[in-house]
Amino acid sequence: MSEPIAEWLERQADRSFGRQRARVETSKLVATFVAGVTATLVATALQVGKPTYLDLAAALLLGASILATRGVIAADRLTEADHEAIVLKAASEGWDAGRTLRKLRSETVAAVAVNDTVVRRVQRVLIRQVVAAALASGVAIVSLLLPDLFS
């Protein structure tokens, strides 16, 4: 009875890791595209007319957005169980196949649990990045539409 449960748990851990990887990769893509669109808007605002304080504010917010984009990419620290190290340890210590398999499964499940924290961290940084980008874009748009507002 325990083997089917252990096999299900292992498959569940594999599915969870796949979802975690997809969420992190999607976050990195969103951050990159949002930063690119924001950079385009800010660059356009800087090229139109005489630079204003709004342009400076948009550029500073763009800098914050780009730093946060780097933060999203740097926060990607998903871990996987080190199967090779476990197998080498098992061979050197003479573990039987059952003990080795239990250790592999437990390490895989533990890695998925740790990765939940990593995914939450990546998404928190992404939210900050999107907010900074939205503010930069908004300021750049105001600068484009109302160029004499803060000259």
Image (cartoon, helix red, strand yellow):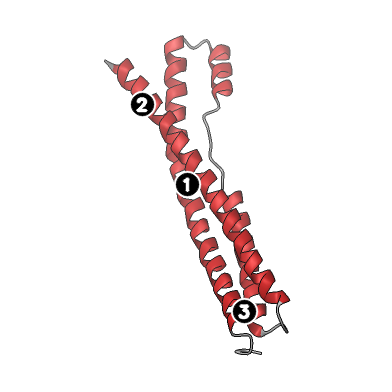
Residue 6, percent from left and from top: 35, 21
Q: Nearer the viewer, residue 118 or 140?
A: 140
Residue 47 location (% of width, % of height): 72, 75
* Secondary structure of the residue carrying numbered label 2: helix
In the image, is residue 44 above or below residue 98?
below
Question: What residue is rendered at 51% in x and 51% in y?
Answer: 122
Precedes in sequence: disc 2 or disc 1? 2
Instruction: Determine whether, in the image, residue 132 is placed left or right of residue 10.
Output: right
* Residue type beneath disc 1: Val
Q: Which residue is mark 3?
A: 144
Residue at point 70%, 78% (across, down): 48
Q: Is residue 112 left or right of residue 93?
A: left
Circles 3 and 1 in contact, beta carbons < 8 Å? no
Residue type of the residue flagged with mark 3: Leu
Q: Is residue 28 above or below residue 151?
A: above
**C-alpha distance separating marks 3 and 2:** 55 Å
**Quarter of the image holding residue 5?**
top left
Q: Which residue is mark 2?
A: 9
**Pair 3/1: label in front:** 3
Viewer-proximal residue, 134 or 12?
A: 134
Could you tell which of marks 3 and 1 lies nearer the N-terminus?
A: 1
The quarter in which the N terminus is drawn is top left
Give me the disc on residue 133: none
Q: Is the residue marked by circle 2 packed among few (<14), some (14-19), or many (20+) residues within 10 Å?
A: some
Cα separation, mark 2 vs mark 1, equals 20 Å
Q: Quadrant of the C terminus?
A: bottom right
- Rendered image: mark on residue 119: 1
Kind of element beneath mark 3: helix
Q: Nearer the viewer, residue 67 or 52?
A: 52
Tell me residue 117's x, y (percent).
Answer: 45, 46
